[in-house]
Image (cartoon, rainbow, N blue to C red):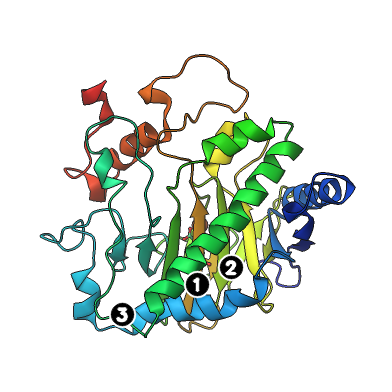
Amino acid sequence: MSPQSQHVETVDISALFGPPGKAREACDAALWQGLKRTGAVVITGYPDAAKVDQRARTGLKIFDLSDTAKRAIASRVMVPGNPNTYRGFWPRRETGLLQNEFYDVGPETPAPGPDLPQMDIFTEATPWPDPEPAPGWRETVRAHYAHLNRVAQAMIVSIGRSAGFDEAAIRARFDGDHSTLRFLSYPAGATSPRQEPDGAVVSGGQHTDESGLSLLWQAQPGLQARGQDGVFRDIPMVENAISVHVGGVMTGLTRGTVPATPHRVLAGDGSARQSVGFFLEPALSAPVTPADYSGETSARETYGWQLLDTFSKRDIWKGVVHPPESAD
Ligand SMILES: O=C(O)CCC(=O)C(=O)O
Ligand SMILES: [Fe+2]
């Protein structure tokens, strides 16, 4: 069995929202050391932290809707004929590494991507359920997106500073809204089709995210992150707890200095599970070259190009997203 007794570190990030100086430097160091040691950390002390639980629970009411209402806002990849492709509802796929259904919310005002065919797929408006699951629901979901975006932006520049990169260069890569707020729901009894090497039974198989930074909130325990020592540790259940881990884009931007965090979700006693993720992603038009690269860049180096390339190679996107080479 995997170790159950160890938790990831907790870091108070309040000083990231204050002026540069000793307190902020200490906070940079604590976040950096925590991520290094336990792969993910739980954060406290950020503005409006006390609103997190209530907003997350409100957003999760999306799963109280009928199947018909959810299908109406599903991606056309899953429900052909629907207008939306990238944002909206995604029913569970039995072959998926993560055994959940989810609902993706994009930015209120998506920033334009590079001038490439099909880029509009990634800048499409979020399809909202109508009627909403509860009065004021959409407004709460929007507030949650804006809140987590602000917290994530403060952390990505902190991590960039610790990794020895110019703060402005890191900030510029994430300047242009393209992040995702995702509500997830795992049915009771869900297990991932992939077996974990250490024998752990999971409903979400080990993986790394493709984000810059991922923020996760869980209604039930189960999430584990792997530290650089190879040990999987539990994300503790604490009030208003957001855990943070690194995604693959940040590894590329920092020339490998900041490794992406492997994580997984234990199936536990098999009860249903819900969680909320915020995936901070670069602007579509931003280059994904290392942040200290000062040479010329073309559309080929942008995050938008990278997304087209990645999606066009995935089975379920075949015929929907075409390889960007055809447009070079
Ligand atoms: O449900 C969770 O806590 C984790 C979800 C996750 O890792 C993901 O969506 O990438
Ligand atoms: Fe993940």
Within 8 Å: ligand 1 and the Cβ of disc 1? yes
Q: Residue at x 66, y 66 (%)?
A: 2
Within 8 Å: ligand 1 and the Cβ of disc 2? yes
Spatial CA distance of label 3 from label 2 is: 29 Å
Residue under pointer 1: 275
Residue mark closest to the camera, 1 vs 3: 3
Amino acid type shown at disc 2: Leu
Mark 1 or 3, nearer chain start = 3
Helix, strand or loop for disc 2:
strand
Amino acid type shown at disc 3: Glu
Residue 127, placed above or below residue 38: below
Spatial CA distance of label 1 from label 3 is: 19 Å
Residue 132, label in figure: 3
Q: Position of residue 112 (x, y in %)?
A: 34, 40
Residue under pointer 2: 223
Within 8 Å: ligand 1 and the Cβ of disc 3? no
